[in-house]
Amino acid sequence: METITTTISLDSFQLDALTEESRRRRMSLDELIAYLVKRYVEETLPAPTAEDRNFMSIVGLGSSGRTDVSKNHDRYLGEAIAHEHLR
């Protein structure tokens, strides 16, 4: 999964506590914060349901590999209708 850089604001107590914990675990502050956020999300947010996964399976279903569909959609639609009509 792609990681995205972000900025967070911590008070000095939070920063000191996290810095100390990252030293204790021998990991970078970034790694510790990412780990804690991941754990929080896994423990508090519901896991995707089978319905969610099925819904997401349609993403990219109609991918043709063409890069000009938004520009030439009428032509492609006409070709598809003509092809179906000739069946």
Image (tube, rainbow, N blue to C red):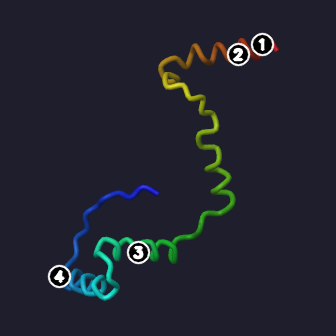
Q: CA distance from mark 2 to mark 1?
A: 6 Å
**How much space separates mark 2 and mark 3, taking CA atoms?**
52 Å
Please, is residue 40 above or below residue 70 in the view?
below
Contact? badges 2 and 3 (CB < 8 Å): no
How many C-alpha atoms fall within 10 Å of the one at disc 1: few (<14), some, or many (≥20)?
A: few
Name the N-terminal-most of marks 2 and 3.
Answer: 3
Question: Which residue was labeled with disc 4?
Answer: 12
Mark 2 and mark 4 lie on one chain; the one further toward the N terminus is: 4
Residue 35: image tag: 3
Kind of residue at disc 4: Ser
Per the image, the residue denoted by label 1 is: 85
**Mark nearer the N terminus (4 vs 3):** 4
Residue under the point 37% across and 71% down? 34
- Identify the residue at horizontal 60%, vertical 17% (top origin): 76
- What amino acid type should be assigned to the residue bearing mark 2? Ile
List the residue tagged with mark 2. Answer: 81
Callout 1: SS: helix
26 lies left or right of 61: left
Discs 2, 1 touching: Cβ within 8 Å: yes
Q: Nearer the viewer, residue 86 or 22?
A: 22
> First in sequence: mark 4 or mark 1?
4
